[in-house]
Image: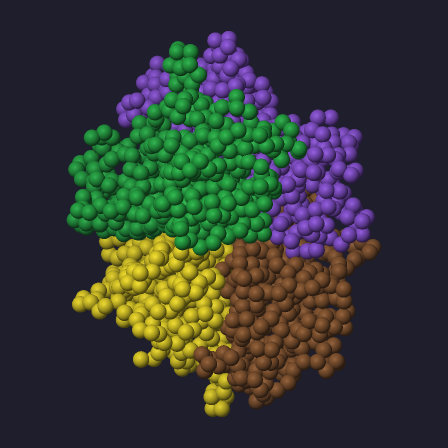
Chain colours: A brown, B purple, C green, D yellow
Amino acid sequence: MNFPVAHETMVQTLGNAEVSSPLRSFRPDGFVDEQQRVFLHSQTHEEQAFRDQDVMPPSFERAGPRDPLFFDPAKVTCGIVTCGGLCPGLNDVIRSLTLTSIHGYGVPRVLGFRYGYAGLAADSEAPVELTHDVVDHIHEQGGTMLGSSRGPQPECEIVDTLKKHGVDILFVVGGDGTLRGGRDIAAEITRQGLSISVIGVPKTIDNDLQWVSRSFGFTTAVEEARNAIQSAHIEARGALNGVGLVKLMGRHSGFIAAHASMASSDVNFCLVPEVPFSMDGEDGFLEALVHRLKSRRHAVIVVAEGAGQDLVAAEENQQRDKSGNLKLKDIGVYMRERIDSHLKGLGMEFSMKYIDPSYTIRSLPANAFDSEYCLMLGQHAVHAGMAGRTGMVVGLWNRYFTNMPIELVTRARQQIDPNGPEWHRVLDSTGQRTFSATSPVQE
Amino acid sequence: MNFPVAHETMVQTLGNAEVSSPLRSFRPDGFVDEQQRVFLHSQTHEEQAFRDQDVMPPSFERAGPRDPLFFDPAKVTCGIVTCGGLCPGLNDVIRSLTLTSIHGYGVPRVLGFRYGYAGLAADSEAPVELTHDVVDHIHEQGGTMLGSSRGPQPECEIVDTLKKHGVDILFVVGGDGTLRGGRDIAAEITRQGLSISVIGVPKTIDNDLQWVSRSFGFTTAVEEARNAIQSAHIEARGALNGVGLVKLMGRHSGFIAAHASMASSDVNFCLVPEVPFSMDGEDGFLEALVHRLKSRRHAVIVVAEGAGQDLVAAEENQQRDKSGNLKLKDIGVYMRERIDSHLKGLGMEFSMKYIDPSYTIRSLPANAFDSEYCLMLGQHAVHAGMAGRTGMVVGLWNRYFTNMPIELVTRARQQIDPNGPEWHRVLDSTGQRTFSATSPVQE
Amino acid sequence: MNFPVAHETMVQTLGNAEVSSPLRSFRPDGFVDEQQRVFLHSQTHEEQAFRDQDVMPPSFERAGPRDPLFFDPAKVTCGIVTCGGLCPGLNDVIRSLTLTSIHGYGVPRVLGFRYGYAGLAADSEAPVELTHDVVDHIHEQGGTMLGSSRGPQPECEIVDTLKKHGVDILFVVGGDGTLRGGRDIAAEITRQGLSISVIGVPKTIDNDLQWVSRSFGFTTAVEEARNAIQSAHIEARGALNGVGLVKLMGRHSGFIAAHASMASSDVNFCLVPEVPFSMDGEDGFLEALVHRLKSRRHAVIVVAEGAGQDLVAAEENQQRDKSGNLKLKDIGVYMRERIDSHLKGLGMEFSMKYIDPSYTIRSLPANAFDSEYCLMLGQHAVHAGMAGRTGMVVGLWNRYFTNMPIELVTRARQQIDPNGPEWHRVLDSTGQRTFSATSPVQE
Amino acid sequence: MNFPVAHETMVQTLGNAEVSSPLRSFRPDGFVDEQQRVFLHSQTHEEQAFRDQDVMPPSFERAGPRDPLFFDPAKVTCGIVTCGGLCPGLNDVIRSLTLTSIHGYGVPRVLGFRYGYAGLAADSEAPVELTHDVVDHIHEQGGTMLGSSRGPQPECEIVDTLKKHGVDILFVVGGDGTLRGGRDIAAEITRQGLSISVIGVPKTIDNDLQWVSRSFGFTTAVEEARNAIQSAHIEARGALNGVGLVKLMGRHSGFIAAHASMASSDVNFCLVPEVPFSMDGEDGFLEALVHRLKSRRHAVIVVAEGAGQDLVAAEENQQRDKSGNLKLKDIGVYMRERIDSHLKGLGMEFSMKYIDPSYTIRSLPANAFDSEYCLMLGQHAVHAGMAGRTGMVVGLWNRYFTNMPIELVTRARQQIDPNGPEWHRVLDSTGQRTFSATSPVQE
């Protein structure tokens, strides 16, 4: 992980803050001051170099309510849009953004744009007005009450729509593609000399955004992924040489697979995008599987959807989906077929069950932990918007909520370090050492 | 439903019952007497014909503890085997059979045979001894602690194994293939002049056994199927023209699909094997779907795996699995492809999510309702075995537990009557009238 | 259980049915005819006496859609009221009544009266109009969207309110007190010569209504009660001589306690109102508990709130709550104190945990099984109302839905038969024989 | 929060580490070196004073595997003891300690002492040997397989027992009383010149230990507490002027109450030990409650068990339980009575439901998040023990696992800062501003 230099952590502001915060009356001392910044590193040896040069180590702006504000809340219109795939907690975020705006700041109008950025395009349908009653119970259901879609829309059309509806602060809830879209909208706003704030709430069920300790919905996803693993384990034990194969989300980062494997204790092989592996050969996966079956008569395998992409034979036309994500070939189906033919080839009696729970995970309502986290993210996003911040996202780092430039968090993905303690803990809990030792991490 | 004639309801007995029941001491009046039979019909007009002829209408033997017994429990060895696919409650049944034998009757030895009938074949591994401690917590997990397998084994090998281990009562937990196997084992036993009882506990997650009001695991399956439908609904509402397509179990009978559709309230189309339907044409499914999307912008479809088999184009080699079941072609995949190309052909923007939760349903532990039911089935199976009954299954009919010949319950499948109140209630709750009206039930 | 004579099963009708059912168009043959009645008994020996006298045994009217109807649905206003304590499924029933009326029959107006019969009193607030959108998601939450209250209101005030709002069919959802209120309202309507139908949907979480096989919400309650027992078991095992004591609902009938004890498998003592027991003496409960602790070091006790009322010392002023129910003294607290002082008196080290989960059970949303059942009850209640039935409730008996006079179902409570198979199964699963044998059932 | 000075963060070690770690073979570079320390603070302004004085700010030892080790794993006997009240995750910790010792380090013997420190007293029963098979499934159940008890035992007896069984590393899982006991055992060991390591795993469902970001079981507890609040909300809305009152755990710190209130979104008043409040007077709680009921007709109140202790009238003899904790008077019962008499005094119709879910929370199995966390805590505790650390606990701080002296973490409690952002977020989400403004935080 490359530490950014100081200017890369600076969040853009629309202008001077001169409006007294309505929160002032009942919370005289609860405001963040600009001296409160949150260090990126938290270990002594990481700081030594800065200390040696007598330079302050890099830090993030701390999130929270500020006083004075840039916007006069009584005159503000907020807009909310949710983009990309479903994720537990989307409705909690919409609810928190709405209620914090209305009840916390006295904002008179909050608009919800339908079906992602498509709802901000030139010919889109009218937004929904979000009131207390409209959002009161939405968090009890999964999904997003606003609907969602993938893919960008022309920035100038979006800015035109914002102007048309008088939106002062646009909250964008989405993944890295969406957030880059938000950054471009903010840039277009700047180009046009407007005072519209664009605040991102990072959404990634895969937990693959840098500088965000944990993305909302992630623990809910891990909980349900554990249930799928439990099913695979029950099926595997229910047959002679039973094999339970579970494909979990994780295009480029295997956090769900890794954490669900640790939360469960029934996983024997956990395969993630960050750690290449071979199927064949004496040290390959198939040999390790056969060894496991011979000694224990069942096996549970968890594979992240982005794992082993080099194995899934290169095909002519790799395609991208509407969000520009590379379409991955299906490692789950590949593994199923390879295992099936290998075990059949050995004349081994076995029974394999393949479980792919993806939509049942994405569409869950948030657990208590994620619900609370979404509440806080929404509160902090509103605080940032009112203070005139723009082109940024809210995050959580070293126990504090932070404001970070979109540019910074979308620059690279967060991934599991194959040589770090997190992956070592996975290896310890699965016991898959022998197998993984055969796969050089760097090729 | 054709009512059986009287002799078809008669349960076979190994011989005279002359041993005093150990239950007698603490339950002097709690025994079933043979006058207590349970009517098959429960409506007045069904009985009229019998009444007119002054004939007693058909009835089942009532299940329950009997006194005296055929076997002397203190000298009995019980055996248990579980066959076929997983189903919630298998471990509860094993546990109830074991504890009722040991604690209720004082049976000294209960053996569990591993991996279905394979565990009773000539060269099978030794059975597990089932004690209080071994089975105490097994019901907290899904699956079967004994393992399972599909397919029959030669009856004479099985009887040899039973003789080898001194088994007096064999409890067979499985579906119609398994039960027919049990009937054949009982016949072989008779042929050899042995006194070994074979008692079936009917297992069918599809609830498709005749004369069994409800099979164990069914309500647990419906509960989880409802969760899958809920996911599909959330996904469908989360996108413009979102389509949620859920494939549920039900090879020949659509009970899970029908009941989960009623338990949920988000299903717009429920398709089952009993009710043929057409995809194309003005009155076909695809047109109805387009109409639904245009008026409501999302749709949820539930399809039982055995529905629309005539639609899935006839292919050359239909195959059977090891249990002899016809391998069904995948209606879920077929529907997904047809819907996809149809909507694309119309140039409609849409987003379809396909959910196939099968193994996550089968492998669940039983809910409270099914747990209790499994407890009772196990108790009644032991009561029947001790009384010397054989070649029979325990069931539940008109509020009473019953003993029924295997022959009778495996003679035909229980199915939804397309003209009956159950299906009408489904139509009322989905509102799919217009569409289904286009499909003549009889062709 | 005393069987009613034939006239007691006759349901009252407002007048001749002459309106063609709107269901006729799409369901030509799906109507109930009056020959389809459901037998009360289902065992051969129960019928013998009637057969000997050549009399048709007693039967219930079968529920279901009829054609023609008494009311013209296009001109009907329906009213709904929910009374008494919360129960899982109330919102499902409201929803089913509303949607069946609106979508099934084309009823133009459905009114919900707030807070029980209080919402029908002279000075009550205006009812809520129930539409598709209002009720669409209510079943996802526990409780009742209409609110509830206990206690009756003057019948003439209620009838005045019904007239004022033009209500033609009033659906009353509640327990025996509420249903008797409904009967009295129907009587007042008759006295005034009006054509207003009163249809009850029986609600009793305790499952204590006669001739109703199972009341809605009961299986959900048993499921959650099992969770409470599970907690008690974990606590009991977590300490030396740990005692887990769980008080469950059941004022006069111990069905929840009995079924949760069977669904769980960790209960050692199950105490219900129907089976008296003594605390003291050689054969009393306390001695049995000490014996259990000495041999197994932990014990789990389930007690229904109405059990052992003779033991809770008679106090001066027994009071009734607003619904007229006798206020029970708290057997849970009594048991806790008696056990505590007894074990302390013996100088035994122990740790007791007392769990009383009542409100967390009552307020749950319905499980899938109950949801579906509520759907059907609502459908059948609307069918009955449209056909002009009044003063009746819908039920389920011997696999068919039935219409029954309120008078009949409120005449006596359904209770566990201490000499019947249900209680014997409880004894078998708890193993509490020795203890319970000491308590003569009849004193 | 007072930052400790550097020497207070130093962890004691039994002696020189000279044994090569068995982890070395498959993980050559995965060891912690002593330069990797974790800063206590994470904000720039907190560090400024140290920077100004050119002093390294305080930091904790980073936890993790070390090489070389102090103990030779092949000769080590580990002991495990669990003390105090139940908490979700205890069995996960026992399992992780056992499996990491056995499979990670090759430890030949792991002993579990029964029923807390009582199992280490002079006359205690023999410990259980913990093997792979014994612990394999224990995490699927709540509670602790070893049992627990409160209260200390003489240190010399405990050390004698350790010597008798040849224990080299004792893992102590418990709260602050237990950990202080562990510290005293370590001191006695030092006094006797022995080489036995004592490693604590901090257990506090209230999350009230300093320098531990989050204690295991806490998120599981918050999840279930949210369910109890949901019940209270449903009950409150189900009656006119319904009041739902929930008492949650939290003797001295209101974290469960605060976080469950945020995770839920139905709480109107959250009362915690850290923020005094008055019941009476114009600005008191009762007036605020009446105002809420008048405007919204229902209210939900969450009160931590340690809140408002000054209000519960001072009684003569305050008592301590066996662990030395002050016995708290019951604020829940007090509130219920005060609210009841106040609303009755106003002649207000209302319905109050009181929910106290404590044991049902404590006895749950851990959710996925806590399960994984327990796995990691167990792994790090074993790493610390093998390296010869003693008198310490493992924790998590600023994204890294840490080793900390017991002395430091038990010196003061972690509490909610009534002027900090956490409490402000609670106020924002409950909207209880007006009321809480009446209670001066400092008196």
Q: Nearer the viewer, residue A167 or B77?
A: A167
Which image quadrant for residue B279? top right
Q: Is residue B284 visible?
A: yes
C414 sits left or right of B192 in the view: left
Residue depicted at x 74% and y 66%: A121
B310 sits left or right of A385 in the view: right
Q: Total marks drawn?
A: 0
Q: Residue extending furthest front?
A: C192
D330 sits left or right of A42 in the view: left
Q: Residue extending furthest right?
A: A316
Residue depicted at x 56% and y 72%: A101
Q: Nearer the viewer, residue A209 or A359?
A: A359
Give the quadrant of the N terminus of chain A: bottom right
Give residue D379's position: percent from left, percent from top: 47, 61
Q: Nearer the viewer, residue A381 or B16?
A: A381
Give residue C291's position: percent from left, percent from top: 24, 40
Give the quadrant of the C terminus of chain A: bottom right
Residue depicted at x 61% and y 57%: A143
Q: Is residue A348 visible?
A: no
Q: Residue extending furthest top?
A: B53
- Depicted D401 relative to depicted D333: above or below: below
Residue depicted at x 76% and y 47%: B340
Which image quadrant for residue D382? bottom left
Q: Nearer the viewer, residue D67 or B183?
A: B183
Give residue D407's position: percent from left, percent from top: 35, 73
Which image quadrant for residue D205? bottom left
Give residue C90's position: percent from left, percent from top: 46, 45
- Depicted D316 relative to depicted C62: above or below: below
